[in-house]
Amino acid sequence: MKKIVLINPRKGWRPPVGLLYIAKYVQKAGYDVKVIEFIDERYNKRRNIKLWDEFYKFDPDYVGLGIISWNRRVAGDIVKQIRSTTSGKKIICGGKDPSYVPQKYLQFGADVAVVGEGEETIVELLNSLTYERELDFIKGIAFLRDGAMVTTSPREPISLDDSLFPAYELVDYEHYTNIKLGGIPGHFIKTGFMMANRGCPYKCTFCAETVRNVYRERPIANIVNEIKWQIEKYNIEGLVFLDDLFYFKDDRVIHFCESILSENIKLKIYAQTRVDRVGRKETLELMRKAGFIQLALGVESGSPSILERVNKKITIEQIKQGVKAINDAGIYTYSYLVIGLPYETEEDLKMTETLLSELHSTFVAVNYYMPMPGTPLYNEEDDKMLDEISYSLTENQTFRPQDEQKRLAYYRAKFQSMSERNPNFNLFRYSSFYGFILDVILFHPFVLLKGLSIQLKQKLYSSNFEAMRTAMINYRIYG
Ligand code: B12
Ligand code: SF4
C-alpha cells in the first residue's frame, strides 16, 4: 500500500478541516495516510524535531500540504527540507494559497500544486502518479514541464450530496475540542467544528473567499449524522459552524433546527450569517430553541461609503434591524468589524463608533484589514510580505508602521469595549475556567508574562487582558 503524509504546516486553534477532508478521501481510495501538524517553532522547537522523526520513520511515497496564505513561508521551508533530505517523494501542495499562486509552490520544489477543492483531484492525482499516467487530463492542477508551468482545466466545485466526514481521528481532535478558548467566543465548553455549506455567493472585496463563490449545501441528514457522531465520539457540548454563511436560506435553517429538535440534540451552537439574511422572528426563535446561542454578523463598518467600497451590499438600516432581530430572539450577536482599510478615514471610524453606540451588539470583534491573494487590493508588496513573514498567533497581524498600528489598536480597543458584554469576562461564568486560570497562574505564569511583555513592547492588543488571553490560547494550543 502506498503511503502519504498530509501536513498542516502550522497548527492553529481550530482543526484543519480541509486537510482532513482530503485525508478521508485519500484513505477511502486505499492509501495509508498519516497527518502531521507542525507547531509554531517559537513555541517548542523540540516538538517539531520529534514530528520530523515521525515523518522520516513513516517514509511516505507522497506528501501533501494544506496551506493558507499566512503559512506560505513555513510551508515553503517544509517543502525545501523534504527536498533536501529525502529523494523520490512526490510533493503536492493544496489549499487556499497554492490555489491562488501555484507557481510559488512549484518554485519551492513541489511536484504538483492543486488548485481549488482537492477531494477528487488528489485521488485522481495519486492514482496517476502511482500508475505513472500522464497528468494533463487531471483537472485543477499545475506542474512544471521543461521548466514552464502547465495548468490544466479548472476543477468544478464538488457536490456535497454524499460528503464523507473529515478524518478527525487522524489528528488529536480531542485536543481541539478541549482548547475551549478557540470555540464559541466567550464560552469555555468542549466544542466541535463542522462545515454545513461551502462557498458564499457574495463578493466583498476584502474577503479571500470571493473566488470560490459557488454556494453549495450538505444534506441536512448528513450534517445531523455528523453531529451525532461528534457527540458520541468526542462528547462535545458546543458546536461551531465554520461556514462563511451558515444562515443563508430561511427554509434550510428551519429544516435544520427541526431535525435537531426531533433528534433531541442538546448543544450550544455558533454560526455566521449576514444582517440582510436574518429577520424572520419565527426562524430566530426556533434557532434559539434548537440551541443557537450566538450568531456572528459581518457588520464591517458604520460608514455607508466603506460598505459601498467593500461591496458589502448592506445598509446601516439593515445592520440595525439584523442585530436587533437576533437580540430580540434571545440569541447573542457577535458583530465583526474590519478596520484599517487603505481608504478608511477618521470620519469613517467615527461613524462606526456612532453605529456601535446604537447597535447593542452583545459582542464586538474587530479585525485589522489584511490584504489576501485573490482580492482586488492585494499588491506586489503584500505578496512579498507573505513570502517572507513567519506569522505567529501572538505577533503583529498587520505589518503596519508602529504609529499606524497604535492608532488602529486604539480604535480596536474602543470598539470592542462597546460590546454589551465583555466576552473575556463572560468566561468567568464557567467554573472550569477558574481551574484553567489557576493552573496558568500557579504553574505557568510565564505564559501571562510573555503576553504582557509583547503588549508592553508592541502595543498590539486592545488591552493587557486581551494580550494575556491570546497568550493563553497559544498555551492551550501548544502547551
Ligand atoms: C477553520 C479556519 C481557520 C482555522 C484552521 C485553518 C486551517 N489550517 O484550515 C484557524 C483558526 C487556525 C484559522 C486561522 C486563521 N485564518 Co482561517 N479560516 C478557517 C475557515 C473558517 C474554514 C477553513 C475550512 O475548513 N474550510 C473548508 C474546507 C473544505 O476548505 P479548504 O480549507 O479550502 O480546503 C479545501 C481546498 O483548499 C483543498 N485543500 C486544502 N488542503 C489541501 C491539501 C492538499 C494536499 C490538497 C491536494 C488540497 C487541499 O481541498 C480542501 C477540500 O476541498 C476559513 C474560511 C473558509 N471558508 O475556508 C478561514 C480562512 C482559511 N482563514 C483565513 C485567515 C486569513 C486566517 C488567519 C490569518 C486569520 C488571523 N488574522 O489570524 C489565521 C491564520 C493563523 C495561522 N497562523 O494559521 C482566510 C485565508 C485566506 C487565504 N488566502 O489563505 C480564510 C479563507 C478566511 C477568509 N475568508 O478570509 N483559520
Ligand atoms: S465577507 Fe462574508 S458575505 Fe462577504 S464574501 Fe466573504 S464570506 Fe461572503
Image (cartoon, rainbow, N blue to C red):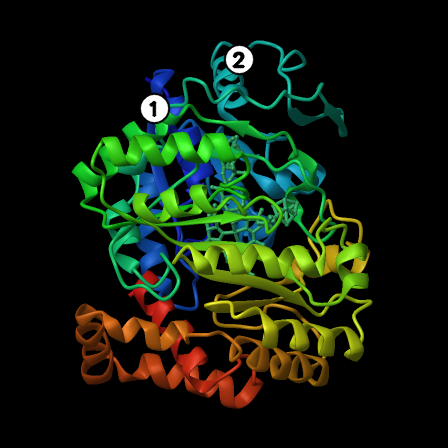
Mark closest to the chain's N terminus, 2 or 1: 2
> Disc count in the image?
2
Write down the residue under mark 1.
221
* Circle 1: element type: helix
Find out if the beta carbon at label 2 lies less than 8 Å from the nearest ligand 1 atom: no
Write down the residue under mark 2.
128
Find out if the beta carbon at label 1 lies less than 8 Å from the nearest ligand 1 atom: no
Q: Which residue is drawn at 54% across and 88% down?
A: 457
Q: Are marks 2 and 1 in contact (CB under 8 Å)?
A: no
Q: Can residue 11 be seen in this view?
A: yes
Q: Where is residue 405 in the image (x, y as percent from the top left)?
A: 66, 79
Disc 1 marks a residue whose amino acid type is Ala
Q: Can residue 196 be seen in this view?
A: no
Q: Residue at x 34, y 77 (%)?
A: 425
Q: In this view, does 97 lie above or below 13?
A: above
In terms of image quadrants, where is residue 331? Answer: bottom left
**CA gap, disc 2 and disc 1:** 34 Å
Q: In this view, does 327 lie above or below 289?
A: below
Q: Which of 179 and 319 is in front in this view?
A: 319
Q: Badge 1 local density, few (<14 within 10 Å), some, or many (20+)?
A: few
